[in-house]
Amino acid sequence: MKAGALARSLWHRAASRRLSVVLALALALYALLLTIWAMSSPATTVRSIASGVPFLAAYALLAVNLVACSLEFFPAVLARSRVRGAARPLGREVEVEVPELGSSPEERLSAALSKIGARRVLRVDGGVLGVRSPLAPIGSTIFHAGLLVLAAGLWLSARGRVSGEAILARGQPFSGSPGEYVSTGGPEGSPPPEMAFEVEDIGASFFGNAILFTDLWARLRMADGSEPTVRLSDPARSGTSWVSITGYAYAPEFVVRDASGAELASAVVRLQSFPPGQQDGFDLPGLPHRVYVEVYPDYVPGPGGQPESRGPAPGRDVRLRAVVLRQRVPVASAVVALGEPLAFDGLTLTFTSLEPMGTFRVVRDPGWPWVMAGLFAALLGLAWRLVRPRVDVFAAVAPGAPGRLRVRVRGDLLPADPRRWAERIARALSEGA
Amino acid sequence: MNLQVALLGAAALLAITGAALLSRRRTGAGRALAAAALAVLLALISYRWWLTGHPPLFGTLESDVADGAALLVAALWLSRRAAPFVTAGAAALGGALPLRGLAHGLNMFPLTISERSLWIDLHAPLGYAAFACLAVAALEAGRLVVSRAQEEETGRLSASLLWGFLFVTALMVTGIWYSGILFGAFWRWDPVESLALAAWLSLGTLAHARLFFGWSERRIAGWVLAAFALALVLFKGLVYLPGGATYHVFDLRL
């Protein structure tokens, strides 16, 4: 086979609608299998299966098929939109009584067809052809182009998305340097997202005393001076990056003093301290001690004197259970209120305040503008195609019967009822069109 | 008796009686009862909205009540257009579906921080519309599968299928976008995503079969039922998956 013939054969195979259907069904089957895998395997395993060679081959083939089909069929779609005649054989003919149309029936029929929604009207074959929504089929091309842009965006996103989590208390700045993130994810060797801001305030609301957030927000001061309020569902964007608040905890501020009252160390510590009673620890700077803390933001004594919290929101009586260890040996342990010193090894540890703290997720995703454009185009194209589909209506005066109209129609997507259209034309004519 | 249970029972009774009348071509009385059932469900939705402060988009009961209302709207709209089997089926399903939600509790909770978004306010109603369209398509397909009479194509199956496809597409568009906001990733192969993709591809394939290969409505009817079975798992089956398999289950046990 010659190279040209081979290329044509390959092209026709690539642009086959049958291939589209086979690939779509194969992907549907893959997706179902992934659903079953997800019942028994962790999400990371499912994601690695979904990015395996068989899946990638199916995605790639479908993308090639989409491109080939779009290029192959777009000229025909475009040609159809320039109405030069009825697009395809029209349906069965019906007749309807109309007022006599006089010496220029085509003019009156054209006016009637325009009145009932035909955007293109032309005289053909002794009658008049009116076409409603002649450009609707272009919606298919927009839809499929949108899917390609979406696929490109998802690919870019999967290859280049980098995310990082930072834990910050109220008043703390963040410059986006790698050391400030507690965890990062993304392609190996990629630097974490760069985004600078300062946490001006953090707030949370709960459903009664339950661990159910009804609001969680943080007001940030961005590098450009703006002060957005971010939420989990409402991030602040800067270029291809965005930041949102995903978690909440309590950050105790402490001070350590020696016997003379001199301050040896103080800081706001970032802890995994949520929900109330969750234990986490921190090292005292410059000292051989580690402190384990549980926060009870709305203290109430529980059974056996154990501390409990009425709910997760800070109340009037904030208490902390602190255990101080030196070289893994407990040297002090107590439930203390804010401002109440805990003595150990000739020193005192005092928690002076409880600051709200948030977990912030910063994401840099080079694919998101493409994903947004692709989603929008796909939806727009499909709506354009489906909401008001093309209908070709042909009307002509019956030979020798000036008061009878013959009507034939063809719906592009759905069967069109010729009787209904004939009646609409008759009504438009009788109303003076 | 609990007011909500009473309202659900009344809606089911009205809708199923209305469906029986619609199936016997007593359209006027059937429509009136279906409309009354819809009014009762809307009253229930309003009551819960008033108490919780948010529209019905939280848990299984709320989605079943909203889907039931959407089906009753479809039944009313179709009652002068579609076959009695389809209209009556939509009305009966619309009344019965909310009863399933009862099994998942009447508890009312405010929206959590992941659900407080205009994207969710858009996403959930698109889901209700998609479910109603696909259920109507399945009823029409079921009628075609059972019926042996030769009849001219009405386009009702195609119309409900294509509108269902449009709404499922819009549902996925809003879901993908919100997943990017919520999780920092647009697609994570969660079961809800995999199932939605499988259902969307099946519906798209049927649309191609109809539009490009000229398959008749009778020929695609069996396939529409299979695609609806997939959609049914997507819309109503996630709650029965093993615990933690998907994030897309919103019934709270506090």
Image (cartoon, grey):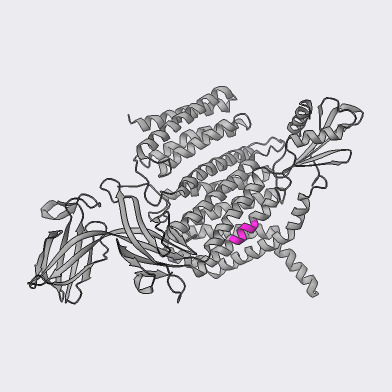
Residue A155's image quarter? bottom right
Measured along the vertical axis of the image, is residue A284 above or below residue B138? below
Which residue: 51% across, 37% down? B70
Measured along the vertical axis of the image, is residue A149 above or below residue B17? below
Which stretch is magenta? Answer: A144-149
Residue A128 in percent (x, y) is at: 83, 38
Residue A289 in percent (x, y) is at: 16, 74
Q: Number of callouts in the render? A: 0
Do we see residue A28 in this rendering? Answer: no
Measured along the vertical axis of the image, is residue A235 above or below residue B126? below
Farthest residue to the right: give it: A400
Which residue: 53% across, 27% down? B20
Which residue: 34% across, 53% down? A216
Which residue: 49% across, 64% down? A239
Query: Can you say which quadrant of the picture contains the N terminus of chain B?
Result: top left
Do we see residue A23 in this rendering? Answer: yes
Of the pair A162 and B209, the residue shown nearer to us: A162
Residue B157's image quarter? top right
Residue B160 in percent (x, y) is at: 61, 41
Residue A201's image quarter? bottom left
Q: Is residue A173 left or right of residue B41?
A: left
Of the pair A261 and B221, the residue shown nearer to us: A261
State the predominant SS element of the stretch in magenta.
helix
Q: Does the magenta stretch include residue A146?
A: yes
Q: Does the magenta stretch include residue B206?
A: no
